[in-house]
Image (cartoon, grey):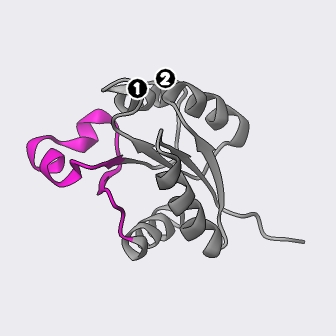
Amino acid sequence: MTEKKCVILAIDDDPDVLNGLRIILEASGMEMVEAYSAEEGIKKYKESKPDFILVDLMMEEVDAGLNFVKEMKILNNKAPIYMLSSVGDSLSQNMNYTDLGLDGLLQKPVNNKTLLKIIQSRIQA
């Protein structure tokens, strides 16, 4: 019997970001499902039932990432959601990300070791 791979849903409108995440995640034995918009992310979420979600803050609309998070609450999502943002550090100083329904905030470019450590700790919790 084979062990189920951890499924990570990554949502970002930048193909380079998604390609970089795929390399990191798949090299670590995880499966990545990608989406280029919040709307596509919701569809992929329903199809893949991911164990962990990474979503960009600003995509096709300024608050697309936050709208995605609100939709995840409605869908009763249990997977940890981490926001990716190029303004991550300043954003985390100015707001409480848990109030938004997020489990954390990651600054772009994402540190590979930090990302893997967070995913592994959250999916085993």
The percent coordinates of residue 59 (x first, y second) are 40, 32
Q: Which residue is mark 2?
A: 74
- Name which residue lies at 59% across and 67% down: 23
- Name which residue lies at 47% across and 54% down: 17
The percent coordinates of residue 35 (x first, y second) are 58, 39
- Name which residue lies at 53% across and 47% down: 15
Out of 47 and 84, give the one closest to the viewer.
Answer: 84
Name the residue type under label 1: Lys
Cα–Cα gap, marks 2 and 1: 7 Å
Q: Residue furthest right?
A: 1
**Contact (Cβ within 8 Å) of mark 2 with mark 1:** yes
Q: Is residue 46 above or below residue 78?
A: above
Q: Which mark is residue 7?
A: none
Indicate yes or no whether the magenta region holds residue 37.
no
Q: Which residue is mark 1?
A: 70
Q: Is residue 101 above or below residue 118?
A: above
Q: Is residue 121 above or below residue 109?
A: below
Name the residue type under label 2: Ile
Residue 97, quarter of the rendered image: top left
Out of 94 and 76, give the one closest to the viewer.
Answer: 94
- Name which residue lies at 47% across and 44% down: 14
The segment highlighted magenta reads: 84-111
Question: Could you say whether the residue bearing mark 2 is in a helix, strand or loop?
Answer: helix
**Neighbour tally class for label 1: few under 14, some 14-19, many 20 plus, Cα within 10 Å:** some
**Neighbour tally class for label 2: few under 14, some 14-19, many 20 plus, Cα within 10 Å:** few
